[in-house]
Amino acid sequence: MIHFVRESLARVLSFFRRKQRDGELEMELAADLELAVEENVRRGMSPEEARRNALIRLGGLTEAREAHRDARGLPAAESILQDLRYTFRTLRRDAGFTTFAILIIGLGIGASSTVFSVVQSLLIRPLPFRDPASLVWIANSGGEGDMSGQTVQVTRLTALRDRNASFSDIAGYFAFYGVGDSTLTGRGEPERLSGVPVSQNFFPLLGVQPQLGRQFTPEECKWNGPKAVMLSYGLWKRRFASDPDIVGRPLTLDNAPFIVAGVMPAWFDFGSIFAPGAHIDLYFPFPLSKETDQWGNTLAIVGRLKPGVGLGQAQAEASVLGQYITAEHPHQNGLDPKLTLLRDHVSGRLRPALFVLACAVGVVMLIVCANLSSLLLARTATRQKEMAIRSALGAGRKRLIRQLLTESVVLTCCGAALGLVLAVAGTRGLAHLNAFNIPLLDSVHLDARALGFTLLVAVATGLVLGLAPAIQVSTISLNAALAAGQRGASESKRHTWIRSALVVSEIAFACVLLVGAGLLIRSFVRVLDVSLGFQPERAAALRIDPSSQYKTQAQRNAYFDEALRRVKAVPGIEAAGLTDVLPLGHNRAWGAGAKGQSYKDGDYPSAFVRIVSDGYLKAMGMSLRKGRDFTPRDTPSSKHVMLINETLARRLWPGQDPIGKIIPDECNPGDREVVGVVGDVHHIALEQSSGSEMYMPIRQCQDYGTVDLVVRSRQPLSSFASSVEATLRPIEPNLPKGGFRPLEDLVDRAVSPRRFILLLLGGFAGFALALASLGIYALISYSVGQRTQEIGIRMALGASTSDVQGRIVLQTLVLAAVGMSLGLAAASALSRSLGGLLFGVTSNDPLSFLATFAVLTAVALLAGYLPARRASRIDPAIALRVS
């Protein structure tokens, strides 16, 4: 990277030095031209004819031949081809400048196209379903808090589906499925697969047809009906080698036979839309029966609006129906439907972040335009004589402006070609980033709309880049151009001001991006500094659900006892415990009111439920604040006990000791005694408070669907994973290999959306900073080259090296100060738009602004010092002789 920057700076410097030498040659040519013109006039030619003839007589000058062609009035098509030929010849002659410009434009356009593809996939492109605009997400209780509050009971879904007049259909899926819920055996090594139970009408409602096979039948969707399964395309291709005869064959899942009903199409990815970050392999039929109704709130539901029905109308009807249905069965869970379009539910929460990224891309492109416009202005200044001569020979201003615009558009189109290559690589890389928990990210790709956007950006950038040089050349006259080439002539102050203004704008734009990136970095650090309530380092989890051979609670408890005994005996294992749910994963809530207390309607306390074993607290690195932990003696025949967290203790018994207090048990009839208080754990998100929590002993409560073994070791995971799996295989022969998951992965996935935005915005900010530093360096270098004679005179009159360097560095700092003043003011106003993305910091965080000021000042000093040091080494005698 350092070599690339050094080479780029050398090419820019070489460009300016070459242009200075070209200017000296042009001064000599101008003197010869004047003599030739005077001679032709003495021969009786008109002034215009004399100039044209003199130019042609001089020969070897490309500009003269082009000017002669301008005067002939070529047809439009041929004239455009002439412009293109001349453009490519000019760009080839300035290979260093052309390479540098194409690289910068390519990076800018590549970033723009990549972000546009992300925004399009997440916010613009319709969901891949039939008539996606009519699909509605129906959440319970506003969709906030635990999953038990967001989901509904089976009878609530069926009642809402049968009584409404706004929806053509309503379907659902079991929201409490888990990662690796099913174990596939019988074909190769055992493998844990993730499956989602769905209602019979779920796929038909979405308009998804199997690629092979059929939908679930009504009989398969009954309680204890025939066991059937649908495969994801990925599983069918990976595990079954895309076998076209797979439909109708039996598979062994959890030691039970399932008939393959069908294979889903390749484009359908349930996890990408409904469960970002999850990888779904199987789909099971979910029975809408009285048995599943007893499970409580378990279904996430989606509806399809009838033609002509709006979301507001459907919401009004659903609210009324919810009240009626709740009143009919007051002892069941309530129904309070809150409707949002499915698209908004899937990616609506990312809209502010994507808007910020889109703005960042726009700022980066403005910096690209400002940077290259400054270089093009300098390049055009050295071509004034060329343009003046062409104008004198008959080329109109429109013709010259068109030539310059053609050059800039061709330049940006070449950059766009490079940008497309970078965008293809960028979108493919993003689509395969499984570490980011972002919906629809795997569908990001370049399509026709993205290609059109790239072309539009390229043309618009080319026009913007060519605008300033075109305006500059439109005012050129031959006399002024010749005068500008005389010894001692200096560049127009107006041109100097324009380039200075462009550099100031670069610094201001870079300042805005750096402040935004600084705020997000500070916020991200604050999120990572949150006390999790557990210690994920050196801990990992392994699914060890008891298989179907353990039918009774006594058998399952014996299995748990033996599993814990075996694992704790493995060398290097410090602690081991069991849990039905890991932090930052699924969550459910039960009523948690203190016995003997009365509560107002709608104010009955609830708490997240965790079913764990002894040793779990130590394995997780959780703290026991008071009381005792669970022990192997907490069995079904002993006193029923529980642990609660500090938040629930304060909620139920403020200022009192909760040890020995009683909470009614929703798992089994009876009460539970609080025997311990544990520290709060972040179970929903790092940015949200822990909420109330209660822990049940796994030997006393069977209301678990999955079981994870959590182990803590002094050794790295790679050292003990195989040993733990080997020691468990005698009691669980179908235990898959490689099933351990580091707990640190849970934290990484929880912060992945924030990290995704931070990485992109931070990359743009770094790119903007590099462009701004190059802009400063190029401007100061060009200024030093133009002031060589002045600097030589000052040094001849006694100016010291430090004086020369000080003046140039001061000029740099003045430009930087103006740019930072404008940028910090704009950042202060615009940073409020980041409010929804920040955590633990304010939009006017002083440290972020100070850090931006310090970084830009350091960059400006470095960019100004390098030309200043070169200027201080100028030999006065040589400077005066060559100027």
Image (spheres, helix red, strand yellow):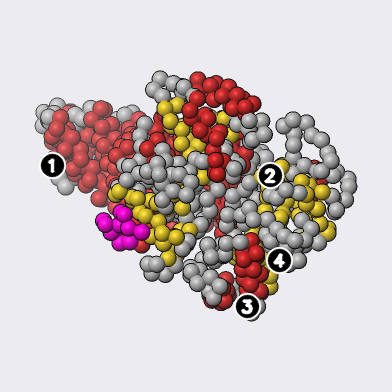
Work out whether residue 355 or residue 233 is closer to the camera in this orientation and state it.
233
Is residue 201 placed above or below 9 in the rendered structure? above
Q: Report the amino acid beneath label 1.
A: Arg
Residue range in magenta is: 240-250
Contact (Cβ within 8 Å) of mark 1 with mark 2: no
Q: Quadrant of the N terminus?
A: bottom left
For this view, does 255 lie left or right of residue 90? right
Q: Which residue is mark 2?
A: 590
Q: Report the amino acid beneath label 3.
A: Val
Q: Is residue 249 magenta?
A: yes
- Looking at marks 1 and 2 on the same chain, the residue that comes earlier in the sequence is marked by 1
Label 4 residue SS: loop
Label 3 residue SS: loop
CA neighbours of label 1 inside 10 A, class few (<14), some (14 to 19), many (20+) = few
Between the C-alphas of marks 3 and 1, the distance is: 95 Å
> Which percent across, then down, holds residue 518?
60, 47
Q: Is residue 457 magenta?
A: no
Q: Which mark is residue 615?
A: 4
Q: Report the amino acid beneath label 4.
A: Gly
- Looking at marks 1 and 4 on the same chain, the residue that comes earlier in the sequence is marked by 1
Residue drawn 82% across the image and 35% down it: 598
Is residue 619 placed above or below 667 in the rendered structure? below
Between the C-alphas of marks 2 and 4, the distance is: 24 Å
Label 2 residue SS: strand
Q: Which residue is mark 1?
A: 57
